[in-house]
Image (cartoon, rainbow, N blue to C red):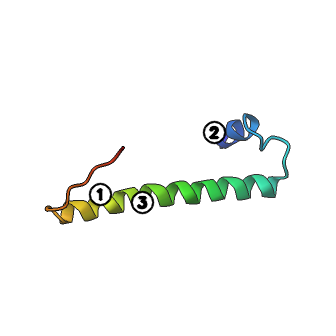
Amino acid sequence: MDVLTIIIQNTALNGMPKWYQALTLTLFAIIATLAISMYFRIALQASEMSEMAMRFGY
């Protein structure tokens, strides 16, 4: 809980209503979880298809 308090104090969320802070942090957690899970899903799918070359980056 201390980590969330420090994050809130060091960002623009400081001074905002509690419901807004919770909504913002929840949306961030959902987006981050979705991005990470999609990355692993792509990596797993690529490993199943051995003939497909997988490159991450530019």
Mark drawn on residue 43: 1
The CA distance from mark 1 to mark 2 is 31 Å
Residue, disc 2:
3
Q: Who is closer to the viewer here, 43 or 2? A: 43
- Residue at the image point whose x is 72% and y is 59% from the top: 23
In the rendered view, does 4 fall on the left or right side of 38? right
Q: Is residue 44 left or right of residue 25?
A: left
Q: What is the spatial separation of the Cα atoms under label 2 and label 3, in whole angstroms?
A: 23 Å
Residue 31, percent across and down?
56, 58
Q: Are marks 1 and 3 in contact (CB under 8 Å)?
A: no
Q: Secondary structure at mark 2?
A: helix
At label 2, which amino acid type do we have? Val
Choose between 19 and 48: the one closer to the eye: 48
Q: Quadrant of the N terminus?
A: top right
Residue wearing tag 3:
37
The residue depicted at 18 percent of the width and 65 percent of the height is 49
Q: In terms of depth relative to the viewer, which is nearer, 45 or 19?
A: 45
Question: Where is 51 relative to 58, above or below?
Answer: below
- Camera-nearest label, 1 or 2: 1
